[in-house]
Image: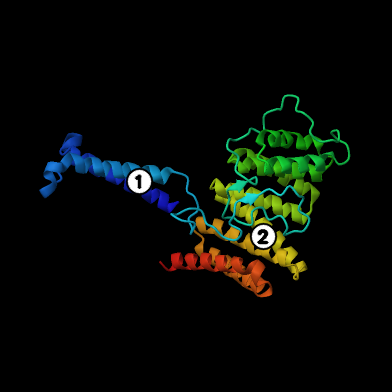
């Protein structure tokens, strides 16, 4: 936020300098002449350059800020599992199995491959063709529809996939399936960059998760809500969601210390929260969270270097970057 304000002030200042150079004695004589020495003959061009640079800086300061990081050119932070999220359409059973995008980093979601054009999910489908063999409400209809949804997204048949996403909630037989339907709708919308639709769907999934009361479902739903809020720079919402998800991940890891996937999910939760806190200016708190994640990642890499070695390398790099910022 401070950087944004500084950029706006700098842009306005440069614009004012450009105006002063171009209009000496302006504002009823309040602007004193600015001598340019050897560049006097280029007064107009110097003024336009200053004003133009000021406008660029001012506009850049107003643009939504993307997380900074090592992905190149100030792009998004890339860390564990930094490949775009793939919707697996399988209900998350263990706590760690469905950490939506094992990245906070690659918040860009995809449904196996990126859809070329957004397909509206919220619109009512005109008498959609029933693809599943089971009629709506029949046992297995929901699971079969999700299987078909997976097939359509794999084949990049976006219209057919959107049709199933629209119908999933009507096929759901209980709150558990309604939560999964809302989560799938959020994943599908997020994969196409429709963050408003994704946020609404994830909020609905969170409501069902709270009603169900399963820690695994609740942690996953909170992570989704936090990820979309982070993408939209609603940092207070993101921090709150990540804090609650972290508490659930930590409790599960303490109850099942031998579950390596649960330990990895805890490390990811720590880093998500660290990133959000860093963006809020809480760098020392973010450092503590990353150091805790480093300890977990180091233990995991020792237990299984092939599966978790890359995680450790990414965490070390992110921690070093953050430490350099603190020391700068």
Nearest the viewer among 288 and 262 is 262
Local crowd size for mark 1, using a 10 Å CA cut-off: few (<14), some (14–19), many (≥20): many
Q: For mark 2, what is the residue?
A: 246
Q: For mark 1, what is the residue?
A: 57
- Taking the image as shown, residue 71 lies to the left or right of residue 201, namely left
Q: Quadrant of residue 276?
A: bottom right
Q: Which of marks 2 and 1 is in front?
A: 1
Q: In which quarter of the image is the C terminus?
A: bottom left
Q: Residue reaching furthest front?
A: 155
Q: Residue reaching furthest top?
A: 126
Answer yes or no: is residue 167 visible. yes
The disc, 2 or 1, on the residue closer to the chain's N-terminal end is 1
Instruction: Classify mark 1: helix, strand or loop.
Output: helix
Q: How is the image coloured?
A: rainbow
Q: Is residue 30 above or below residue 255?
A: above
Q: Is residue 280 above or below residue 132?
A: below
Task: Work out how far the residue at label 2 is from the one at label 1, CA to CA, in angstroms.
Answer: 37 Å
Q: In which quarter of the image is residue 303?
A: bottom right
Instruction: Classify mark 2: helix, strand or loop.
Output: helix
- The image shows residue 126 at horizontal and vertical percentages of 72, 24
Residue at 52% from the left image edge and 56% from the top image edge: 77
């Amino acid at each position: 936020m401070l950087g944004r304000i500084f950029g706006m002030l700098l842009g306005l200042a440069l614009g004012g300098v450009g105006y002063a150079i171009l209009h000496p004695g302006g504002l009823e004589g309040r602007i004193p002449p600015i001598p340019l020495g050897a560049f006097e003959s280029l007064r107009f061009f110097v003024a336009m350059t200053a004003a133009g640079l000021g406008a660029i800086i001012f506009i850049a300061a107003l643009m939504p800020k993307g997380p900074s990081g090592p992905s190149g050119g100030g792009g998004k932070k890339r860390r564990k599992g930094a490949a775009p999220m793939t919707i697996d359409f399988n209900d998350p059973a263990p706590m760690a199995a469905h950490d939506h995008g094992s990245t906070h980093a690659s918040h860009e979601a995809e449904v196996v491959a990126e859809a070329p054009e957004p397909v509206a999910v919220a619109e009512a489908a005109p008498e959609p063709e029933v693809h599943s063999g089971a009629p709506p409400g029949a046992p297995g209809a929901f699971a079969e529809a999700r299987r078909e949804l997976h097939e359509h997204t794999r084949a990049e048949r976006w219209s057919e996939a959107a049709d199933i996403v629209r119908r999933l909630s009507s096929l759901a037989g209980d709150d558990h399936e309604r939560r999964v339907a809302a989560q799938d709708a959020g994943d599908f919308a997020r994969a196409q960059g429709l963050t408003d639709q994704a946020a609404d769907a994830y909020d609905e999934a969170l409501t069902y998760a709270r009603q169900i009361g399963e820690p695994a479902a609740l942690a996953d739903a909170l992570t989704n809500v936090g990820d979309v809020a982070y993408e939209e720079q609603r940092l207070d919402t993101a921090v709150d969601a990540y804090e609650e998800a972290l508490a659930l991940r930590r409790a599960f890891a303490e109850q099942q210390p031998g579950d390596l996937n649960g330990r990895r999910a805890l490390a990811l939760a720590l880093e998500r929260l660290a990133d959000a806190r860093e963006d809020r200016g809480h760098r020392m708190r973010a450092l503590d969270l990353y150091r805790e994640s480093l300890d977990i990642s180091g233990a995991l890499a020792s237990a299984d270097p092939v599966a978790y070695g890359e995680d450790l390398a990414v965490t070390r790099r992110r921690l070093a970057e953050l430490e350099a910022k603190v020391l700068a």
